[in-house]
Image: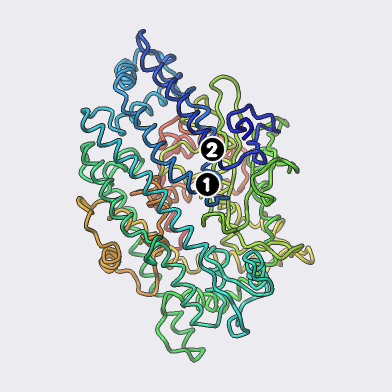
Amino acid sequence: MTANPLLADWTTPFQLPPFSEIEPAHFESAFKTAMAEARREIDEIAGQDGEPTFENTVVALEKSGRQLTRVARVFFNLTGAHTNEALQKIERDIAPKLARHSSDTLLNTRLYDRIASLWEQRESLGLNEEDAMVLERYQKMFQRAGAGLDETGKARIAEISQRLATLGTQFSQNVLKDESDFQLVLETAEDRAGLPDFLLTAAAEAAAERGLEGKHVITLSRSSIVPFLQFSTNRSLREEAFKGWTARGENGGGTDNSEIITETLALRAEKAALLGFENFAAYKLDDTMAKTPDNVRGLLTRVWEPAVMQAREEEAKLAEMARSRGENHEIEAWDWRFYSEKVRNAEHDLDEAELKPYLQLDNIIQAAFDTAGRLFGLSFEEIKGLPVYHPDVRAFEVKDRHGRHVGLFLGDYYARSSKRSGAWMSAFRSQHRLDGEVTPIIVNVMNFSKGARGEATLLTFDDARTLFHEFGHGLHGLLSNVTYPIISGTGVARDFVELPSQLYEHWLSEPEVLSRFAVHYRTGEPMPKPLLDKLLAAANFNKGFETVEYTASALVDLELHLIGDPAQLDIAEFERRELARIGMPKAITLRHRIPHFQHVFSGDGYSAGYYSYMWSEVMDADAYGAFEETSDPFDPATAERLLTCIYSAGGRQDPEEAYIAFRGRAPKIDALLRKRGFAA
């Protein structure tokens, strides 16, 4: 093997990773070398003889481990978006090693003593606001990792971290295996009954990708299965598809996640107890805006009750629609989307098949870019021929209103079997100014069903909203303007990180955005005003269902992490019991059932934290009111304040203070209730 490209200087345009030169085998040696280098750097910082200073300790830590960060970002972006068996094997091997490396750093007594000494002297160090926040971050990070424990406690914490890393990796790989193995082949006209052309085209493309040329395949990608559940008149196939979708991770055999979940929960509970917390939820929430489980439950419960009432009214309408069609069966979970589409058509004269020709992927991308241009002065120029990691990935250079380079944005939009489900934003490089201006490389990953060869890819309105949501995260990374990597871009509290993304969704629904970019993919004609009006009038249609499936998932996540001793927990029984306790309507399932709840079990990012979307939605609904009050969705003064206080600020300020700096006051939940169509 030639010199390892992961460890060399990257001479590619924008210093993009040289993907065409990188092979899976490169990662093993690159991780080994980079971890050894990072360990030497950490040991040098910890072993200094001189008194700790902000520069020789905190700044030095921020500059350490850069090669390891670079290798890890390339690797984990690939394992999410374009993996294979070789990468998955390396991932299983490297996850506990990286956890051990992190523990060796965060549990280093001499290093922690230096941080603690600086923390005690913080008032006399002459730190600016950003420096002070970074010092606070390090103090909290070390304490929450167990740096203050005795040696026995530290050893056990390190063991727990390594085991959790292994379990999280296996959980994620199991879900991906169940997703990629499932395919519903539509053989006959009866199998395809009711399906619109756009879905048949996507299903034919999915079949061709799987070597089934000439057939039609429904996959577990949301952009495939959701429209199938909306339009298929074959009820038995709807049931088969739905059960395949909701059974990921609990099919028995090697991909069953039940034991992984119980062990994960037990280890998290043990970790929380070691650190002096009553349960893992209390530990996790201590470092968020919400602060306590009671605060989270209070928010979710306030929304849950009106949502369930509305969902039951929606279910009654679905049952009536079924009866009107001579179908007198009880509404089941695989029926909801089908009859909901019929009711929406009846009440609003609106159906997805009518909308979709006006929602071309390329145009929605341009709508997101144009909105960023009008709000923040950004421009996006597509650059062809860059060494991206998959032929479908598109690259755009981002510039500010003065023509200066801001960063590189990558868009990876199509579903494929090598990509995990869902949609997300990530970074190959984060912005910082620690020793010169480092510009970001940000990626948005989606799972849209690709159009036929030579044809436009068409989106549902929910797909378009997802694109705007993830691009909001992307802007949070691209517009970051901070000194330190630890607080760059999305390096903020978990229940604040969804504010920029959810807020950005609002602009998709602005008539002046849709009227420009929602044009027919064949004729180029803009969406007719009556259709646009119907779309906007139906904005809150089915909101009871959407709120219930999300809020139930958030409540289940919270309750799972309040259990003191979950080692013997029966996951399926717990899920049934908890849903019965909260009064979950029978015809609605969790948005993410526990066996495939990747937000919570593929790592601990959203563990005891899935509520974050709603916590942030309280802010995003209230924040958009600042634009509504000006009667201009692109009001320059409000946009400038939004840029300064939220999108460019990273984590340099307490999130509550950042929000108040933008809005002039704390957020009010009333805006969220109005947004979802519930009484305030």
User: Label 1: which residue?
Assistant: 87
The disc at residue 27 is 2
Residue 649 sits above or below residue 395 on the image: above
Whether residue 642 appears in this view of the structure is: no
Tell me what residue is drawn at x 49 percent, y 26 percent: 484
Left or right: 33 in relation to 332 = right
Color scheme of the displayed model:
rainbow
- Residue 288 position, x and y percent, is 35, 40
Q: Residue at x 70, y 34 (%)?
A: 401
| Badge 1: residue crowd in 10 Å (few <14, some 14–19, many ≥20) | many
Q: Residues within 10 Å of mark 2 (few under 14, many from 20)?
A: many
Above or below 57: residue 609: below
Q: Amino acid at mark 1?
A: Leu
Residue drawn where x is 56% and y is 31% of the image: 431
Q: Position of residue 106 (x, y in %)?
A: 34, 28
- Callout 2 secondary element: helix
- Name the one closer to the observer, 301 or 633: 301
- State the SS at label 1: helix
Front residue of 389 and 628: 389
Question: x, y (%) of residue 2?
Answer: 64, 32
Disc 2 marks a residue whose amino acid type is: Phe
* Residue at point 29%, 48% (across, down): 295
Q: Are marks 2 and 1 in contact (CB under 8 Å)?
A: yes
| Lateral position of residue 151 relative to residue 360, left or right | left
